[in-house]
Image (cartoon, grey):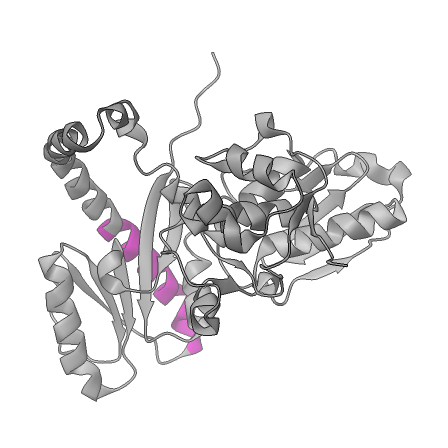
């Protein structure tokens, strides 16, 4: 009997007072496939908060944040040069190294502390779960009895579409809140590599900080030396600007040299990559007012299909409705349509209808 894939824990973390390079460096160490990591902007909405102290006068702000998080049972890891702090169950201090030679040890300490505090947080969460389920069952009975059968999957869709509230698409400021730069994410480069492979009928490469991925558009497969579990978190981390897409000196007759690598079906791999990057955000360069034309249906039997996905794709198959109006037409939160749009666009399965 085949072993079941261990369930991945969905956890959220927040970085306060970090530059992108420092944040990227720390995130690159969190490679345990047991955890699926999502970044949050607000500390109180996360499972764990990192704070990077740059100045001594930050102490008052740190103490206020520490107390706010303590009331919500949220662990905090403080990276600092100061020796005046005392650790407790929810607050752990790590002294930053003065010399670069100590950087590796420092990062291992950050990693070990993170996993230790997160394990404690999840353990306390699990202990509270039975009480919450009973309470939620009473709410379900009062609001919608048919909801009870989905109790175990209450947050299933949220895991993929995020929590972004609906916006006014006529407000430029609100639109910016749900826009993302696709060039920061992995799925963008997979799409570029696929198009390059398709046009040249050759295998292409995507060179990333996680190694090289080989894309074959003819057979619709991706090759990489790591397993799906080992690269589970790379899709949602926004630091791919240094990624390179190119054609290697590898002819199609040499394809057998890749057979020792792990193979991934292209469509479900890119679908999962794009929805994990999106989480209710859309590429910044799209025209959300333009009607959407569905060029082909994805193979839904291979994909992670969350609530409302099929309804959204069916609506767009008519070729007359825009992303802006989809949420209202289907009476669903906009984040569902935005996430599906990002995934279908990454797969090249939709296009904007040009008005005459």
User: Which residue is rendered at x = 10% and y = 33% of the image?
Assistant: 131
User: Which residue is rendered at x = 14% and y = 68% of the image?
Assistant: 66
Q: Where in the figure is residue 137, as x and y percent of width and height?
A: 16, 29
In-image side of 29 versus 93 (left or right): right
User: Which residue is rendered at x = 28% and y = 22% of the image?
Assistant: 149
Identify which residue, 199 or 216, lies in the foreground: 199
Identify which residue, 259 or 221, lies in the foreground: 221
- Answer above or below: position of 123 versus 87: above
- Assign the C terminus to one quadrant of the image: bottom right
- Visible residue check, residue 246: yes
Q: Where in the figure is residue 109, as x and y percent of width and height?
A: 31, 61
Decide whether residue 101 is among the magenta residues.
yes
User: Which residue is rendered at x = 25% and y = 57% of the image?
Assistant: 45
The residue range painted magenta reads: 100-117
In-image side of 50 versus 235 (left or right): left
Q: Where in the figure is residue 19, as x and y percent of width and height?
A: 42, 76
Residue 75: image quadrant is bottom left
Q: Main secondary structure of the magenta part?
A: helix
């Amino acid at each position: 009997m085949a072993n079941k894939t261990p369930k991945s824990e969905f956890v959220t973390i927040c970085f306060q007072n970090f530059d992108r390079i420092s944040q990227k460096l720390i995130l690159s160490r969190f490679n345990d496939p047991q955890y699926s990591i999502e970044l949050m902007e607000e500390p109180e909405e996360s499972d764990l908060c990192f704070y990077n102290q740059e100045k001594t006068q930050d102490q008052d702000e740190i103490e206020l944040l520490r107390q706010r998080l303590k009331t919500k049972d949220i662990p905090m890891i403080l990276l600092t040069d100061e020796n005046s702090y005392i650790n407790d169950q929810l607050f752990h201090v790590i002294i930053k190294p003065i010399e670069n030679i100590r950087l590796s040890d420092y990062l291992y300490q950050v990693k070990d502390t993170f996993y230790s505090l997160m394990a404690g947080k999840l353990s306390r969460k699990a202990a509270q779960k039975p009480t919450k389920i009973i309470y939620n069952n009473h709410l379900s009975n009062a609001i919608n009895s048919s909801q009870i059968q989905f109790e175990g999957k209450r947050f299933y869709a949220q895991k993929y579409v995020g929590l972004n509230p609906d916006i006014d698409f006529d407000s430029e400021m609100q639109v910016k809140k749900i826009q993302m730069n696709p060039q920061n994410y992995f799925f963008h480069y997979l799409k570029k590599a696929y198009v390059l492979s398709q046009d040249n009928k050759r295998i292409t490469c995507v060179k990333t900080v996680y190694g090289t991925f080989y894309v074959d558009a003819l057979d619709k497969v991706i090759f990489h030396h790591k397993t799906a579990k080992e690269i589970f978190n790379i899709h949602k981390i926004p630091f791919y600007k240094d990624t390179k897409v190119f054609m290697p000196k590898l002819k199609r007759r040499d394809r057998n040299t890749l057979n020792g690598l792990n193979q991934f079906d292209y469509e479900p791999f890119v679908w999962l990559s794009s929805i994990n990057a999106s989480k209710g955000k859309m590429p910044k360069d799209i025209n959300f007012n333009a009607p959407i034309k569905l060029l082909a249906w994805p193979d839904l039997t291979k994909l992670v299909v969350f609530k409302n996905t099929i309804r959204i794709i069916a609506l767009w198959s008519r070729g007359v409705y825009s992303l802006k109006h989809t949420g209202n037409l289907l009476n669903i939160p906009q984040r569902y349509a935005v996430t599906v749009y990002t995934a279908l666009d990454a797969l090249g399965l939709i296009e904007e209808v040009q008005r005459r």
